[in-house]
Image (cartoon, rainbow, N blue to C red):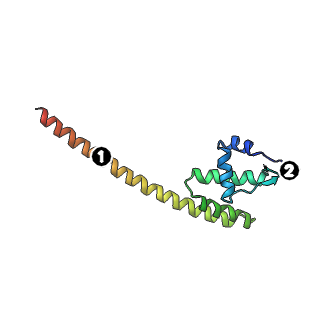
Amino acid sequence: MSETYSIAQLAKEFDVTTRTIRFYEDKGLISPERRGQRRVYHPRDRVRLQLVMRGKRLGFSLEEIREMIDLYDADPTEAAQLNLFLAKLRERRESLELQRMDIDTVISEIREREEQCEKLLNQKKV
């Protein structure tokens, strides 16, 4: 018999609430076995939860994560999943680099405004 996990065990392992895990279940990202009212998670569910958590940490939407996970199930070679993941990673990196450029521009402008304000204040002190 393969190892199974309770929702509490997975919540503790991934440092999330049981509510979060149930939310991912509602979204179809994981699908534990039901034994009466109890959810029983198998290694496959644990791996899927791990992929969800990694995807969230990297900033992917749940829909993007679902797309990648579904490919994992559909292609045993994992080539399609890896190609999609690589494309999504590049897309995400480019987006973050643009955000960083925007942030650097705003910080630079803030510094200029600070200097202007300080000059004006110093002129008024004289």
**Horizontal relation, residue 74 to residue 118: left or right:** right
Q: Tag 2's secondary structure?
A: loop
Q: Which residue is under mark 1?
A: 110
Task: Mark 1 or mark 2: name the one nearer the start of the chain.
Answer: 2
Q: Secondary structure at mark 1?
A: helix
Query: Does residue 9 sit above or below 64 in this rendering?
Result: above
Where in the figure is residue 108, as x and y percent of width and height?
A: 31, 48
| Residue 119 circle label | none
Question: What amino acid type should be assigned to the residue bearing mark 1?
Answer: Ile
- Screen quadrant of the C terminus: top left
Local crowd size for mark 1, using a 10 Å CA cut-off: few (<14), some (14–19), many (≥20): few
Most distant residue in the top direction:
126
**Residue 114 rendering spot, x and y as whole percentages:** 26, 42
Residue at 73% from the left image edge and 42% from the top image edge = 8
- According to the image, label 2 marks what residue? 2
Q: Residues within 10 Å of mark 2 (few under 14, many from 20)?
A: few
User: Of the residues shown, which amino acid type is indicated by label 2?
Assistant: Ser
